Each structure stands twice: as structure tokens, then as C-alpha cells.
Amino acid sequence: MIQQKTNCGFRTVFRVRYYETDAMGIVHHSNYLRWFELGRTEYLRSVGLPYRALEEQGIASPVTGIRCHYHKPARYDDEITLKVVVKAYKNTRLTMAYEIFRDELLLCSGESDHAFIYEGRPVAPRRSLPDLDKILSKCLQSDSTEV
Amino acid sequence: MIQQKTNCGFRTVFRVRYYETDAMGIVHHSNYLRWFELGRTEYLRSVGLPYRALEEQGIASPVTGIRCHYHKPARYDDEITLKVVVKAYKNTRLTMAYEIFRDELLLCSGESDHAFIYEGRPVAPRRSLPDLDKILSKCLQSDSTEV
Amino acid sequence: MIQQKTNCGFRTVFRVRYYETDAMGIVHHSNYLRWFELGRTEYLRSVGLPYRALEEQGIASPVTGIRCHYHKPARYDDEITLKVVVKAYKNTRLTMAYEIFRDELLLCSGESDHAFIYEGRPVAPRRSLPDLDKILSKCLQSDSTEV
Amino acid sequence: MIQQKTNCGFRTVFRVRYYETDAMGIVHHSNYLRWFELGRTEYLRSVGLPYRALEEQGIASPVTGIRCHYHKPARYDDEITLKVVVKAYKNTRLTMAYEIFRDELLLCSGESDHAFIYEGRPVAPRRSLPDLDKILSKCLQSDSTEV
């Protein structure tokens, strides 16, 4: 798996696993959400926020919304490039955007919305989690310059 | 699994399976899309369009878009009620809408968009698949009276 | 989903979901283990041991081993009958056996081994969990009369 | 993902994905079979037998049996090392063996049995698929020197 923090967002490259396909011979549409998650957690790791460490500090960032457009199907063993950016971040809400490519062909684009939970209660990072806030703000700024 | 064609749409009742949960102790967000699919195929069966039979006739209806809002988490062994309706159907595109409840509590609402493929090519059912068109039109009419 | 405690073991009937298939057009072999789990938890429920309630009491029963023979493939929308029995139960270990049928045709047979964890430590139910021990012993006796 | 053909078998390194965990906070036992598949297909690729190319030639190698021992749980984000060897290969049947480690700790060991299907019929590679036979025989010889 090739992984790379780029000027704008994060890029990860991986292959389609057999169990991710369905009887249509293509990747089941639910699995793109799992790839979004994969890209998102690797992005967070690359900026010093491994999700496991967040969880160990009592922080969670559950998915509150998903929007996804499927343009072309992916197939078993395809080499997939996933690009992730922080699209919006304000108060209690984070939105990340994703593009999934095979070679230069865009297969899927999508977004996920996230809340922040600290010790069981919803919080705004700016007030309750200043370290997290600082990094996410910086990612937003860096990612919004180009996309 | 209780299943029921209602005046408006279709209702199916099932329990959360253990493997559908994740380390947060809740159902992984990708699995709601799989439940949407479950409800959608049971709805189609109830109106005389079992998806397997459609596939055997060379018809497929791939997912082209997903929108999903997660309101409250579902947990292992929860009894889930899923309601499905045909929300829009016109030319080459079908949109179905879903609501997922535990008891009276709305956990998740969402929509899926679908194209129609016949013998490998995208088609409009009205022109190419009149039997399918007739049933979907009737579902749309019946479901739009109340939702 | 039809479910039934029989003289010997437990029987559950369900349909193959689309996402359980893979690009071979058949159910991915890993999903049979998920069906075993489904049958096992429904069996436990039927004898008054819902797994969720066990977990809430601090009891877990993790899988320590799996053996599985795949005879014939299952396909999307097949109606599956799963039979489960308690095959062995002694001291710290429980073994359950499974048979998966489509109509009268045996598709898959398998076994799972389980340990018992109580408040984080491995235990023998006979010493530490007498209520659980009593029910499992009775299941073993009832299931071994016929299989 | 680090991948490497070793003198004996094949080694692949990857991280546990969030969706692979369950409400116990550990990797669901069914997912180890999916990792076996991942290691197996990467092994085949490394010896010049990408599974996708085999499928395109009309060859399939379905799983006919699984045996798996779970020693210790894997958790989200763990770095996993998977070792795969050809354990047995004769006539119509191939057996591969797997070991899954976190650091030096053995988490899981298992085996999978495989048949060979060519154009829909079961075959013995030695008679029907000489190129495949040659490579598998060589793998068996190389892998059996050390394990």
C-alpha cells in the first residue's frame, strides 16, 4: 500500500480484495464507504492523529452522513488510488471528500460528515480539543487551496 | 424476519447480527447500505419483481448514488424496522428512500439512486422493459400518496 | 426468518443477501462463519441465553477454532436452512456443529470451538457460571441423542 | 503493504481496518479467512500466477475446506504479518497454511483446501493445467524445506 501526504490531502493506493466483489463481478457499493474510512484514517495518521490514539484519549468521530456517486465499477485486483481532503471543518462538524480512481478514470466520488465525541458527549474541538482543532484547521487550509 | 407490503412502501423487520458491529460497539455505518439493499430486494419481491429473476432476464439495476444520514446508532441484537418507498422514478433513473427504526426511534434515513442495464447497456424501462416500468410506476404512485 | 428449537438443536431459515456473494457468483466462503454465528446466537436465545444478556453480565464466548467443509456453493437469494447442535461441552470448552442446506442438499458442514470469559478471565462455566453450565449441559444431552 | 516472497512461502504486512473489528473490540473471526485469501492471492501473484489472470483463462480454485485456530485477538490498527506456504499439493487438491502475527506473537494459524475448476469442471492441474502444476509443485518443494 503506497501512502502519501500530498500538498492537498492524502493519497493511498491499494488493490481490490476478492471478498469486496459481488455477484455482478464488481465491487459492492457498500465497500467504497469502507475505503473512504481507510483513506481517512491514513490521512489522520499522516498528520499525527492516529485514530486509535484518539480513541484511547476518549475521542471518537462517528460518521453522521454519507454522500456517494458511483461513476464506473471497480473490479477484483484493480489498483485503486484514493484521494482524501478535508472539505469543511467548523464548530462541531467535519466534512471529508473522496475521489477513487483506477488509473486516470474516476470511479467514485463522495463525502462523509463527522461529529466529535469526547468522553461520551458531543463537543466542538475548538473549545474542548484544541490540539485536534489546530491540526484539522491546518488541513482544511492546506486542502482548500487546490481542490 | 417479518415482511410486509404496506399501502405505502414495504416494511421489513430483522435483528442486528454480531458481525455487523464494530469496535465502537455500534453497527458500522457501511452496513446500513446493505440493509437498504435487503429492504429494496424484499420490496421488489413483494411486487412480483424478484431481483434474481431480473438478473436471469439480463436486467441489472446498479446503485449510482447513495445519501445517508445517521441519527442514532444501532447495536447488536437490536430489532430493526426498515421502511422502503419508491421516491422517484423517471426515464433512466429510480430513487428509493429508506428509514430505519428501533422501536419508534429513527436511527437512519437515506436514499439510493439506480440505473437500469439491459443486456449490458443502460436503458429506460419505459421503452425497453415495459413490464418493469408498469410495476415501478404503480409503486411510485402508491408510495407518493402518503410519504 | 423462520426459527425453531427442534428436539435436537436449532433450525433457522433465511435468504442469501446480495452482498454475501462474490465475483464467482457464489457466497464468499467467509460468510458461512457469519451464518454459523447467526444460528448459534439464535439457538442460545431459544434456550434462554441471549448473547447480548450474557455480554451485559460480563460473559463472553469467543471463537477459538473453526473447521468447515464446503460441499456445494450457495447463490444469491437461495433459501438456506441452518441446523445447529451442541456437539461437545466439557470444562472450559464448547463445540457447536452446523449443517447448511438448500432444500435437501447439504452445502456446508462445520464446527466452532468456544472458550468462556467472565470479567476478563477464562473460566469453566461449571465452576463459575452454574446457570449457563446447566443449560449447556442440557442442550448437549438433548442434541447428542440423535445426531 | 509490504510484500515479499521468502525462501519459504510468502509474507505480507498490513494494518487492521476499522470495519474488520466487532463489538468485542477485536477483529471478527470471519475476517481471518479474508486475510488468508489476501495472502494467498499475493503469493500467487509473486510466483507469476495472478488469480485474476487465472480466472480470465477459465480457471478457478474454490475453497473446499478451512481449519483455523485463534490464539490471541487482533485489534484495530494492529500491524499484522501474514505468512503463507503451500503445505500440500497432489492431484486435484491444494492445501495452503497460514500464520498471522502481531510482532512476534502468533495470533492465528490455519489452513485452506482448494479444488481446481477449468471451464466449469473439476480437474487435476497435472493433467489439464501443466503450467499451473509446474509452479505449484515448485512452491510445494520450496516451502516444505523449512516449515
Image (cartoon, coloured by chain):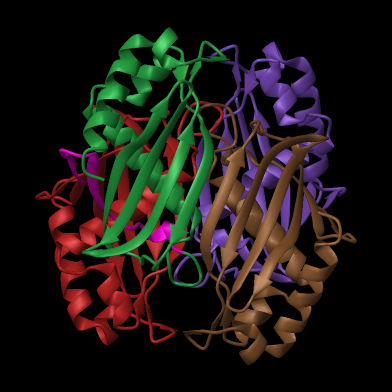
Chain colours: A brown, B green, C red, D purple
- Tell which of A17 and D143 is nearer to you: A17
- Tell which of C128 and B55 is nearer to you: B55
**Is any part of residue A18 visible from this angle?**
yes
- Tell which of B10 and A144 is nearer to you: A144
Residue C47: quarter of image: bottom left
The residue lying furthest to the front in this view is B145
- Tell which of A97 and D34 is nearer to you: A97
Q: Pinpoint residue A16: horizontal percent, then vertical percent.
A: 68, 41
**Is any part of residue D80 visible from this angle?**
no
| Residue in view at x 16 percent, y 70 percent | C135
Q: Pinpoint residue B129: horizontal percent, then vertical percent.
A: 39, 11
Q: Is residue A49 above or below residue B134?
A: below
Which stretch did the figure color magenta? B1-21
Is residue D125 shown left or right of residue B132? right
Q: Decide whether residue B5 is among the magenta residues.
A: yes
Q: Pinpoint residue A56: horizontal percent, then vertical percent.
A: 61, 84
Q: Decide whether residue D42 is among the magenta residues.
A: no
| Residue in view at x 60 percent, y 59 percent | A112
| Residue in view at x 43 percent, y 85 percent | C121
Q: Quadrant of the C terminus of chain C?
A: top left
